[in-house]
Image (cartoon, helix red, strand yellow):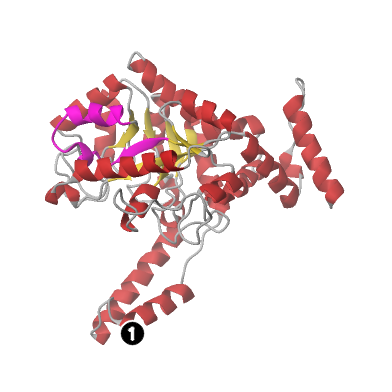
C-alpha cells in the first residue's frame, strides 16, 4: 500500500513540476489514491470559501468584544471551522459572514451589530497574528498564503446592515467588507428575499438600485444569494460589474426552492462573467433530503399538539432528539460535486466555486463534508468525475479571484 501511495504522490508531484507533463487520468485510480492526491492539491492550492457564519456563532456564544476571545486556534468539538481543521483541509481564505438577522430590520441596531461582528473578526487576527491575517484583496490572500497565514476576508450578509443610509456602503467597504448579500430571510429596504412571499418591492427597490450603483462604484461584490428571481434580474440589468452567488446551489436538484439558483439565473451570472459558489447544506443539495426534513418537522409539530407540549418541555426535548436521530436524512459529499458539475456543463468551468455556509446550516452537512478539514473529500469527488488539477484550481480560487479583480476594475481600481 505504501508503494501505491508513494507512486500516486510521485505522479502528482511530477505533474506539478514538469513543464510538459501529461494530466493524470484520475478516474482510473482507486478512491484511496485519489484522496491522497486531493490532500496534496488542497495543501498546495489556495482554497477560498465564499461564506462561513463563524462570527455570528461566536457572538451567540458570548464571545463579543466584552467577552473572552473565541478559541479559534485550537480544535473545537462543535462548529464547522477552527484553525486546526482549516489547516487539515487546506482552507486558506474563508469569507467571514457579517450576518444580520432579519429581526434587526424592525427593532434597529443592525449597523451596530455589523460593527461588533467585524471587530470580533479583527480580534482573531490581532490575537494570533502569527497564524491569521485579515485580507481585503486577492493579492493580500496570495501574500498571506505564501507566509503560511490563514486569511479572513469579510462580507456582509443582509444589506439591512446599512440601514437607510447609502453612505454606509462606503463605511463598510472602508471597514474591509468586500461583498454584500442584498437580503436575507425577509424583504428589506433594498429588495425582496426568496424566503419572503410578500414581494414588497416586486424586485429591487429604488433604494436598492442606488445601493447596486454604489457597490459598483466602490468595487464591492454584489452577492445575489437570498434574493428573489425578480430581484436578481433587476440587479443583473443594472450592475456594471460581475455578480456572485456566494452560497447558493443549483435549483435543478431542488425544484421550486427559490433560494437556489435556476439554470436561467446561472446562465445570466455567467453572461456577466460572475460565478455561483455552491453551498453544502443538505436541503440545498437534495430534494429527498429537504422533503424528509419537512416531514420530520411536520411530525414533531403534530406530536407536540397531540400531547399538549411545547419544545421547551423536557419530555418533548427527549422525544424530539430521539425521533430526529432515528429519522435523520443523509446526503453525501458527492452531491456537492454533482452541483458543481451541473454548473460546469451549463456554463463552463470559469463560473463556479465553493461557498459552504459552514456554521450556518446546522446539522445538515453531507457525509464526508462536515467541517473545514474535509475539503479534500470534495476534491477527490471532482477528480473521480474527471476534473483536472487545473480545473480544481479554478474552482478553489482562480475563478473567484478573476471575478473579484473584474469588480475592482469596473470601479477603476
Crowd around label 1: few <14 · some 14–19 · many ≥20 (10 Å): few
Residue 300 visible in the shown view: yes
Residue 22 on image: x %, y %: 76, 27
The residue lying at 46 percent from left, 46 percent from top is: 356
Quadrant of res 263:
top left
Residue 363 on image: x %, y %: 44, 62
Instruction: Say if the magenta span includes residue 174.
Output: yes
- Give the SS element for disc 1: helix
The residue lying at 43 percent from left, 39 percent from top is: 125
Quadrant of res 38:
top right
Question: As rendered, which of 21 and 229 lies closer to the eye?
Answer: 21
Give the magenta range: 153-175
Instruction: Say if the magenta span includes residue 389.
Output: no
**Left or right: residue 18 compared with residue 285:** right
Residue 119 on image: x %, y %: 32, 41
Q: Which residue does the numbered mark 1 point to in the structure image?
A: 315
Amino acid at each position: 500500500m505504501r508503494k501505491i501511495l508513494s507512486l500516486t504522490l510521485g505522479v502528482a508531484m511530477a505533474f506539478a513540476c514538469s513543464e510538459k507533463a501529461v494530466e493524470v487520468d484520475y478516474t482510473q485510480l482507486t478512491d484511496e489514491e485519489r484522496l491522497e492526491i486531493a490532500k496534496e492539491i488542497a495543501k498546495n492550492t489556495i482554497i477560498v470559501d465564499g461564506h462561513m457564519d463563524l462570527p455570528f456563532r461566536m457572538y451567540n456564544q458570548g464571545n463579543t468584544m466584552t467577552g473572552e476571545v473565541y478559541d479559534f486556534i485550537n480544535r473545537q468539538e462543535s462548529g464547522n471551522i477552527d484553525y486546526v481543521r482549516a489547516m487539515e483541509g487546506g482552507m486558506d481564505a474563508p469569507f467571514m459572514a457579517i450576518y444580520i438577522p432579519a429581526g434587526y430590520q424592525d427593532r434597529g441596531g443592525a449597523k451596530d451589530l455589523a460593527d461588533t461582528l467585524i471587530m470580533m473578526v479583527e480580534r482573531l487576527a490581532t490575537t494570533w497574528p502569527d497564524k491569521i491575517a485579515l485580507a481585503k484583496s486577492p493579492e493580500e490572500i496570495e501574500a498571506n498564503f505564501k507566509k503560511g497565514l490563514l486569511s479572513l476576508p469579510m462580507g456582509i450578509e443582509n444589506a439591512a446592515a446599512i440601514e437607510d443610509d447609502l453612505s454606509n456602503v462606503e463605511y463598510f467597504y472602508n471597514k474591509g467588507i468586500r461583498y454584500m448579500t442584498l437580503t436575507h430571510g425577509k424583504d428589506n429596504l433594498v429588495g425582496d428575499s426568496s424566503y419572503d412571499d410578500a414581494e414588497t418591492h416586486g424586485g429591487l427597490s429604488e433604494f436598492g438600485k442606488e445601493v447596486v450603483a454604489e457597490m459598483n462604484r466602490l468595487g464591492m461584490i454584489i452577492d445575489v444569494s437570498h434574493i428573489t428571481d425578480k430581484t436578481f434580474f433587476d440587479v443583473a440589468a443594472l450592475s456594471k460589474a460581475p455578480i456572485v452567488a456566494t452560497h447558493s446551489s443549483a435549483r435543478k436538484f431542488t425544484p421550486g426552492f427559490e433560494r437556489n439558483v435556476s439554470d436561467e439565473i446561472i446562465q445570466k451570472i455567467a453572461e456577466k462573467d460572475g460565478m455561483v459558489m455552491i453551498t453544502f447544506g443538505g436541503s440545498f443539495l437534495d430534494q429527498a433530503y429537504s422533503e424528509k426534513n419537512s416531514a420530520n418537522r411536520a411530525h414533531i409539530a403534530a406530536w407536540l399538539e397531540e400531547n399538549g407540549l411545547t419544545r421547551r418541555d423536557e419530555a418533548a426535548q427527549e422525544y424530539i432528539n430521539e425521533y430526529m436521530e432515528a429519522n435523520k436524512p443523509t446526503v453525501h459529499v458527492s452531491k456537492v460535486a454533482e452541483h458543481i458539475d451541473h454548473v460546469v456543463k451549463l456554463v463552463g468551468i470559469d463560473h463556479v466555486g465553493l461557498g459552504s455556509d459552514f456554521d450556518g446550516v446546522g446539522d445538515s452537512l453531507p457525509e464526508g463534508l462536515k467541517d473545514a478539514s474535509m475539503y479534500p473529500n470534495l476534491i477527490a469527488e471532482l477528480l473521480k468525475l474527471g476534473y483536472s488539477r487545473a480545473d480544481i484550481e479554478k474552482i478553489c480560487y482562480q475563478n473567484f479571484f478573476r471575478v473579484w479583480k473584474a469588480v475592482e476594475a469596473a470601479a477603476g481600481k
